[in-house]
Image: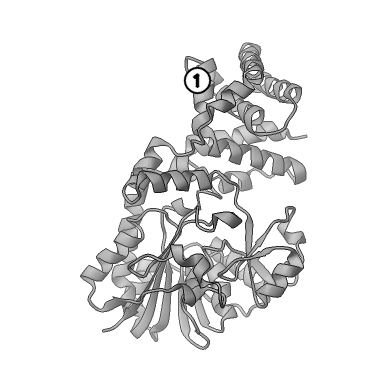
Amino acid sequence: MSDPRQIAAEMLQKVLTDKAFFSDVKNASDSLAGKDAAFANMLVLTALRRLVFLKKVLKQYAKKKLPEKAAFAEYVLLLGLTEILFMDTPDYAIINSWVDIAKRKTDKYVAGFVNAVLRKACTDREELKKHDLGEFFTSEFYRILDHGYGKKTISKIQAASLKEPALDITVKSSPEIWAEKLGGTLLPSGSIRLSTGGRVTEIEGYENGDWWVQDAAAALPVKCLGKIAGLKVLDMCAAPGGKTAQLINAGANVTSLDISESRLKKLRDNMLRLRFALPQTICADGIEYLQNYKGEPFDIILLDAPCSATGTLRRHPEIVHIKNVSDVEKQVALQQKLLNVVSHALKPNGILLYCVCAITKAEGEKQIQSFLETHSNFKLCPLKAEDICLEGRAQELRDIFTEEGFIRTLPFHLAEVGGLDSFFIAKLRKVA
């Protein structure tokens, strides 16, 4: 029988040493299910959100770096401290479990050290908690944010990002009815935020394809397009298909493009569950596709551009520990290449909707400002709260609209109902 704590330590080690996304690591470990899987996942995600503080605590008890042969013990200790400081597990269960794992994975001497550290931390628990300042961001992540935000804003982003995000869904129709039916909160943009836990597949309406999981911020771009029934739309970087589903549901004639065939298969599977007619799907490199496009131009191109994904740090706290400034710069260069060729496939007077799930302004505001300065054939279409909100609720989302007419969501927006992922959206029109 698999030990969920040991699996959690192995996952944490892989995330931090290989700079891997937790979702990829989790999917590769299929030995856990049910409550064991949920416990391991929560343990790792909590440790990632609290890692800066946990490392400071560990340094108090382990002055020297552990030898290479005992490296696994560091992850054992970090997760043991996570349980002691942030979870409700009884002390005896924490100590006994992690000491046993240390014995199996290292040796009895290292296990003895683990035992001593965890026992001392249990004794010092309340004193240690007094020194928890809510630290989440690493020095490198501060460097990423410092290019676009002041200290007060960064502090608010950090505090909001420590909270586990809720589950948001997009429904095909009647959001008011579905919110009441599912006991959820109807957000001003029409997304529904669920407070219920448990398996997504067991929630009413999933099996019938009445809705799909989609963060409320990620659902905003398509809402910016207005009435699109009958229009020809290219959804770029489309998988796993949340925006494709929105486009189809709004009556558009959709072509979904992605560079990964396996991700396109997931998109098609999702459309089948939702009982939508399958869109045309194209597996191709976006730059090459746009450069060589010879077909009838599109009315709309939705460019959900490849990005640093730093805007998803609430759901993917590993982002804070595995991304650096260089990663952002690489994505900025790729986005520029895509933007430079998008005109080839867009009709005159057509709409380019650019969006990224990145918190960095280099990938958002600065990227589009630079594009507009060098591409006189595109003009900005300023976005307004009335464009995306349910009737009478525009005031609740005023803060996400910039002076220029962009949308920039941040984790502390809608804080009273759980916050948002960070997204950037710009709507442009091709005028020549």
Give the structural element (helix, strand or loop) at label 1: helix
Please indicate whether residue 11 sits to the left or right of residue 329 in the image. Answer: right
Please indicate whether residue 376 sits to the left or right of residue 253 in the image. Answer: left
- Indicate whether 95 appears above or below 294: above
Q: What residue would you read off at disc 1?
A: 59
Please indicate whether residue 121 sits to the left or right of residue 236 in the image. Answer: right
The way the protein has been coloured in the rendering is one colour
Residue at (65% x, 76% y) in the render: 172
Name the amino acid, label 1.
Lys
Q: Is residue 355 visible?
A: yes
- In the foreground, 5 or 117: 117
State the image coordinates of residue 346 (x, y, percent, origin top left).
Answer: 36, 81
- In the foreground, 15 or 41: 41
Residue at (46% x, 54% y) in the render: 311
Q: Is residue 205 visible?
A: no
State the image coordinates of residue 394 (x, y, percent, origin top left).
Answer: 51, 72
State the image coordinates of residue 399 (x, y, percent, origin top left).
Answer: 45, 62
- Indicate whether 75 appears above or below 45: above
State the image coordinates of residue 210 (x, y, percent, origin top left).
Answer: 70, 73
Q: Say how many tags the image has.
A: 1
Q: Residue furthest bottom?
A: 230
Q: Quadrant of the N terminus?
A: top right
- Indicate whether 17 appears above or below 421: above
**Image quadrant where residue 289 sits:** bottom left
Residue at (57% x, 79% y) in the render: 248
